[in-house]
């Protein structure tokens, strides 16, 4: 049986996607991360600008997510999160999300696995865990509730 505990929730501010349509594998979207915040019982802080989600929209409509984002804790420690995930749902729901509407996340699937790279010190425990998250896409934000897998 799989066990987990809450790690943190983050809200990433995102810019308009840069789109390369109709490639051999599907449509590529590069979505810049411009900032944000995160908070949890063991760590909190801000998301630094400069990260991105490099997505592949497959012919079957599934968005494959490939995320790299840097976080800065409240005490100034910077660490990297690497995430791989998927988002998909009924065509009408995905169209609403694409128009920037707030859609109840129970109407679509948005999951992400995460690993971290942290420097030696109080947060190096992040280097030894895997986290999974459930996500929500808003017009200019992505919200992820992340859980450490025990």
Image (cartoon, grey):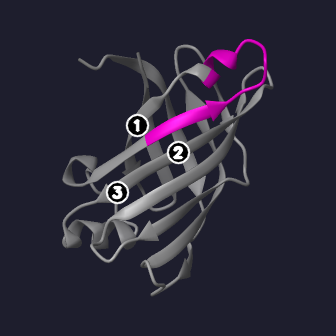
Please state if 35 lies on the left or on the right of 138 as rendered.
right
Q: Tell me the quarter of the image containing the N terminus.
A: top left
The residue sitting at 78% across, 24% down in the picture is 119
Q: Quadrant of residue 57?
A: bottom left
Magenta stretch bounds: 113-127
The first of marks 1 and 3 along the sequence is 3
Q: Quick one: label 2, few (<14), some, or many (20+) residues within 10 Å?
A: many
In three-dimensional space, the C-alpha distance between marks 1 and 3, rounded to whole angstroms, equals 12 Å
In three-dimensional space, the C-alpha distance between marks 3 and 2, rounded to whole angstroms, equals 13 Å
Which residue is denoted by mark 2 in the rendering? 83
Q: Is residue 61 magenta?
A: no
Please state if 24 lies on the left or on the right of 58 as rendered.
right
The residue sitting at 55% across, 82% down in the picture is 20
Q: Quadrant of residue 108?
A: bottom left
The first of marks 1 and 2 along the sequence is 2
- Name the element at disc 2: strand
In three-dimensional space, the C-alpha distance between marks 1 and 2, rounded to whole angstroms, equals 9 Å
Which is more foreground, mark 1 or mark 2?
2
Q: Position of residue 33 (x, y in %)?
A: 63, 55
Q: Tell me the quarter of the image containing the C terminus.
A: top left
* Mark linked to residue 73: none
Q: Is residue 121 magenta?
A: yes
Which residue is denoted by mark 3 in the rendering? 87
The residue sitting at 21% across, 47% down in the picture is 106
Give yes or no for contact between labels 1 and 2 (Cβ–Cβ under 8 Å): yes
Q: Is residue 40 above or below residue 24?
A: above
């Amino acid at each position: 049986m799989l066990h987990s505990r809450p790690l943190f929730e983050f809200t990433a501010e995102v810019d308009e996607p840069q789109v390369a349509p109709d490639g051999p594998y599907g449509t590529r979207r590069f979505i810049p991360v411009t900032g944000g915040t995160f908070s949890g019982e063991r760590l909190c802080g801000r998301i630094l600008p400069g990260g991105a989600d490099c997505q592949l929209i497959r012919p079957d409509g599934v968005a494959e997510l490939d995320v790299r984002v840097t976080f800065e804790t409240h005490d100034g420690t910077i660490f990297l999160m690497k995430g791989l995930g998927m988002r998909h749902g009924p065509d009408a729901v995905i169209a609403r999300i694409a128009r920037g509407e707030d859609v109840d996340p129970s109407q679509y699937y948005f999951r992400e696995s995460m690993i971290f790279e942290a420097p030696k010190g109080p947060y190096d425990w992040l280097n030894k865990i895997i986290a999974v998250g459930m996500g929500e896409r808003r017009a200019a934000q992505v919200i992820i509730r992340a859980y450490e897998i025990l």
